[in-house]
Amino acid sequence: MNGSPKSGSPCIAAAMRAASRRLTHAYDEIMAPSGLRFTQFNLLCELERHASNPPSVSELADLLTMERSALGQTLRPLERAGMLELGRDERDGRRRPILLTTKGRTAIANTQPYWEQAHYKFIEFFGIQATEGLRGTLRDIAEDPRLDEIFHEGQQGR
């Protein structure tokens, strides 16, 4: 390491968290005129992707790799704003699917151009190949179950 300000901690998790905070802040700034923060927009888009089989809070937390309590903090203002609602599953009355409302779909449509602007600024800066490679690596980190296995090897009985 050369001691430059960029050298920082060798910890991958710390670097990812710092990058995530910085990128989220940049997206939030560009998306501000829409009235939605990046995290809210991402959540609404995930609900739109699963509209044919709406997830419950627990299922959505798993899809987004989030803690339920953190998800609840993001859901509440969207529910109060009428962008989503908790429904009732006809087959299982205990299950409460999260339903995207017309107002939520309109919010997605109104916010999409701002998200695209932020997205294309990132691509313009880093290039399409680097962006696609980074996205693939990050999806692997978020979704590959083998990573959990590696981190839990030898942990039984502790």
Image: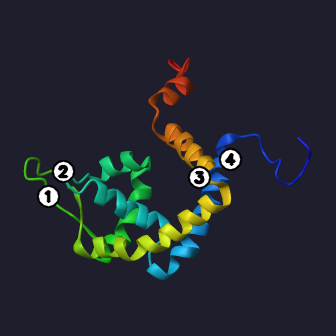
Q: Position of residue 128 (x, y in %)?
A: 59, 52
Frontmost of labels 2 and 3 is 3
| 15 to the left or right of 49 | right
Can you say whether 11 is above or below 42 in the image? above
Q: Amino acid at mark 2?
A: Arg
- Looking at the rendered image, the quarter that the C terminus falls into is top right
Task: Work out whether mark 4 precedes mark 1 in sequence or the reverse, and give the earlier one.
Answer: 4
Residue at numbered disc 1: 88
At a point 11% along the width and 52% down the height, the residue shown is 93
Foreground pick, 1 / 80:
1
Disc 1 + disc 2, Cβ < 8 Å = yes
| 71 to the left or right of 123 | left
Frontmost of labels 2 and 4 is 4
Task: Work out whether mark 1 precedes mark 2 in sequence or the reverse, and give the earlier one.
Answer: 1
Task: Work out whether mark 2 precedes mark 3 in sequence or the reverse, and give the earlier one.
Answer: 2
Residue at numbered disc 4: 14
Instruction: Name the element at disc 1.
Output: loop
Residue 124 quadrant:
bottom right
Q: Amino acid at mark 4?
A: Ala
